[in-house]
Amino acid sequence: MPKIIFRTSGGEVEVDALVGDTLLEVAQKNGVSLFGGCSGAGVCGTCHVLIPPEFLQKLNEPSDHEADLLEVLPMSKENSRLACQVVVTDELDGLIVNIP
């Protein structure tokens, strides 16, 4: 079971994640404050997170729709993803998810 670390301005929370869940689902199941306004449909951008560059290649590729949305989000960076669109795999063990 991969361990995922959610980092906010208030500190860090390390949780066990189920393979196949999205990062948004993992956060919500573990009481991490990460809002998903569209309930995981990938259309609102409220679950925007920052991923360390060394993990970007290990993530599932963003869909064209997610990439388009990230381009228009004002706080988006090169390592931005929508937590509702990132699927947990065993390769993500130790991933630090920065919640802006």
Image (cartoon, helix red, strand yellow):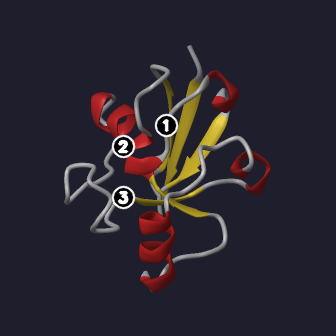
CA gap, disc 1 and disc 3: 14 Å
User: Tag 1 or tag 2, which sits nearer the N-term?
Assistant: 2
Say what amino acid the circle numbered 3 marks.
Cys
Secondary structure beneath dot 3 equals loop
Residue behind mark 1: 87
Is disc 2 in contact with disc 3, using a CB cutoff of under 8 Å? yes
User: Tag 3 or tag 2, which sits nearer the N-term?
Assistant: 2
Say what amino acid the circle numbered 1 marks.
Val
Is disc 2 in contact with disc 1, using a CB cutoff of under 8 Å? no
Q: Residue furthest left?
A: 38
- The picture quadrant where one finds residue 38 is bottom left
* Number of numbered discs: 3
54 horizontally vs 1: left or right:
right
What residue appears at the point 41 percent right and 74 percent down from the top-left corner? 69
Residue 34: image location, x then y, percent: 33, 51
Density class for disc 3 (Cα within 10 Å; few <14, some 14-19, many ≥20) is many
CA gap, disc 2 and disc 3: 7 Å
Residue 61: image location, x then y, percent: 60, 51
Residue behind mark 3: 47
Residue 98: image location, x then y, percent: 55, 54
What residue appears at the point 44 percent right and 40 percent down from the top-left corner? 23
What residue appears at the point 41 percent right and 37 percent down from the top-left corner? 22
Residue 59: image location, x then y, percent: 63, 44
Density class for disc 2 (Cα within 10 Å; few <14, some 14-19, many ≥20) is many
CA gap, disc 2 and disc 1: 9 Å
30 horizontally vs 63: left or right:
left
Q: Residue furthest front?
A: 64
What residue appears at the point 28 percent right and 66 percent down from the top-left corner? 43
Residue behind mark 2: 24
Please identify, in this view, whether the residue under mark 2 or under mark 1 is nearer the observer: 1
Say what amino acid the circle numbered 2 marks.
Leu
Secondary structure beneath dot 2 equals helix
